[in-house]
Amino acid sequence: MSQSDEVSKGRRSFLLQAAATGAGAAAAAATAAAAQAPTPPQGAASPGASPSASPSVSEVRSEGRPGSDYMVDVLKSLGFEYICANPGSSFRGLHESIINYGGNSRPELITCMHEESSVAMAHGYFKAEGTPLPVMAHGTVGIQHASMAVYNAWCDRVPVYLILGNTLDATMRQPGVEWVHSVQDAAALVRDFTKWDDSPVSLQHFGESAVRAYKMAMTPPSGPVVIVADTELQEQPIHSDRTLVIPKLTPPSPPQAESGAVTELARLLVEAEQPLFIADRLARTPAGLERLVELAELLQAGVVSTIPNLMPPVGAGRMNFPTRHPLNQTYRSNAAIAAADVIVGLEISNFFGATNIFIDQVERTTRPAIRPDAKLITLNSTDLIQKANYQDFQRYAAVNMALTGDGEATLPSLIEAVRRLLTDQRKSTFERRGKALAEASAAARERFRGDAALAWDASPITTARLAAEIWEQIRKEDWSLVSGGLSGWPVRLWDFTKHYQHLGVSGGSGIGYGAPAAIGAALANRKHGRLSVNIQNDGDLMYAPGVLWTAAHHRIPVLTIMNNNRAYHEEMMHVQRMSNRRNRGVDRAHIGNEIDNPGIDYAKLAQSMGWYAEGPISNPRDIGPALKRAIAVVKRGEPAMVDVMVQPR
Amino acid sequence: MNRISSIALASLLVVSLGAGAQTPGPAATAGSAARGKTTFFRVGCHQCHGGEAQGSPYSTAPKLGPAALPFAAFTLFTRKPRLQMPPYSPEILSDAELADIYAYVTSRAAPVALDKLPN
């Protein structure tokens, strides 16, 4: 008998033993993971154990726990609430250990219908909860499906925690599918846009790397990580001669910018006449929002933040600043940027784009959006994580000062440095400045309200009217906009005050993020009793609509309003641009871009997967009553959809 | 995959429209709002500016009506846009069609009272 045959037989015997004892193990699971204590030695299965005449009898003789039980202990020690997966044979051992040994609790397995949905759910979950949600996937076809969502997470600095199944030992692979589902280096596909990865070759190695991966993912600047769970490690019994330890996780303190540079920045801010902050992915936590408010109020300085798809494109990443704060200059960002003498970019990759105007005509040109004497300063942790291949780091911005450190972690010391430099004279100046900024902000807001009142009764419905109708229904609730920009109207018309009320954009602008990220965030919001609101683009939903079933199956309450404009309008505008530039006219620009003829009935689609759904609605007066009915369903703990026919923009 | 960028009229146009209503010039009165609506959608104006010419903050595409620039300025920005908007030459949008579009955008309904919007 060859060695491989012996090992295979041992695994087969051992597996059925594990199945027979699964129920008991599940009961014990709650205590098994107890935190980072050594795992007791287990009896090893005997590779040479001979099967009896009846496989169903002989295969329950084996002893010992499988390696994947230890993996579950490790995952439990990291505090994961859920784990997302579309099932796959390369992690069948871990799957079984989660649901039986681990009792399908912390983590609870969330059934996904596409690996891209799994990762995007983890992406949205993190931004609502602040902790990672792991994802299991095949090391080959699974990560290939998931890769675009991983790229989104990378660009958005979100710590998605990926566990990839793979069989490295070629002699252990079943001929056929297991070969095409095996790879030498499973993490290679996403290494350009993940922060760290490892392929452990022993269980102890897995434990240490799994804890290290968590630490690496969460240390700002955050990012996705990959751990490969080899099938042999999952399925072979834990050897009795080895004591497995779960390493202790010590969360690192985030890096702060150098103290001398912080003092110099404080001096520039105090002396400035029109200082301005542009915040993008600054507020990692609610404290980041609070500190930015404190700093802005201390200086009576303007803040531009949290507005998606603006030109220049700034501040779409996180909820950094209340939308109706008098110092919020986002409604008039172009004017604020043009007037500022000191501009501080806070965790913004696209600082060049925020301070320049790019013109996409036949000859692409750029001109500054700032005054010639403006001092540009960045406070970023992104310089600590740049890679070369993918170009998410944006165009190089020539600045006067570049502070390297985590923005949120640096704000307290910057605030203290500013306080030390304040004088009564400067405070008086600040007061006048703050009053002028408040007036300008209020005027801009009223201007936008006036714009929203245009075409109020139009059908298809304007994006502004839809945003206003949603706001009317949710404004007295504890709401969270989990996804969807709706042409920027919500941030203009709604009163955003809390960190979880705006979760930002995808990062990589890869379509297919919206629906699963929204449902992942709604999963996190569920236990907090928040009303999760998802404004869902139609084209985005059709990438992987199976996530609707996941929401229904796991009873994830989320209010989804379809932004149903029946086309990929961004792309249609690009084709228009090409057509007119070539003097051919835009009459055919819809070809390849429209999602019509037939139009998709999203309400029926959602209903088919267990959702309450209404629509399509084309009369704006019908939106409010439909939303009321849908919100009632969501409050009962179910997902609900209202499909609304809206204008392109 | 999506490329996030925008097609829009010039910022100068934004500023001009923000300044308030203007009286349409003589050439505009020759246009037909009914024909203009058809052309407005055929040549894709609504993609950025909205079906009622109400504008959109998404792509800094300004509102085009009911208050509008003088027709001469409207024509200039359509023929030779300054920022992201695609240029419309007379070969693909005639002067007469442009006048029809102008008639359409200037005939749009006035905004409703602001007290209809939730605060």
Image (cartoon, helix red, strand yellow):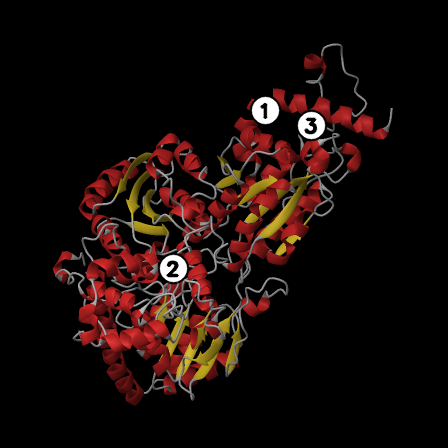
**Badge 2: residue crowd in 10 Å (few <14, some 14–19, many ≥20):** some
Which of the 4 image quarters holds residue A341? bottom left
Q: CA distance from mark 1 to mark 3?
A: 12 Å
- The quadrant of the picture occupied by the C terminus of chain B is bottom left
Q: Are marks 1 and 3 on the same chain?
A: yes
Q: Position of residue A163 (x, y in %)?
A: 61, 43
Say which residue label 2 marks: A286
Q: Can residue A521 be seen at all in this image of the molecule?
A: no
Q: Can residue A396 be seen at all in this image of the molecule?
A: yes
Residue toward you, A283 or A450: A450
Tell me the chain of label 3.
A
The amino acid sitting under disc 3 is Gly
Say which residue label 1 marks: A22
Q: Position of residue A156 (x, y in %)?
A: 49, 58
The amino acid sitting under disc 2 is Pro
Give SS at disc 2: helix
Q: Where A190 sits versus A559, above or below? A: below
Tell me the chain of label 1.
A
Q: CA distance from mark 2 to mark 3?
A: 46 Å
Which dot, 2 or 3, sits closer to the camera? 2
Q: Indicate left or right for B34 with A410 as reference.
A: left
Q: Where A474 sits versus A181, above or below? A: below
Q: Give the number of the disc on residue A64.
A: 3
Q: Are marks 2 and 3 on the same chain?
A: yes
Q: Position of residue B106 (x, y in %)?
A: 19, 66
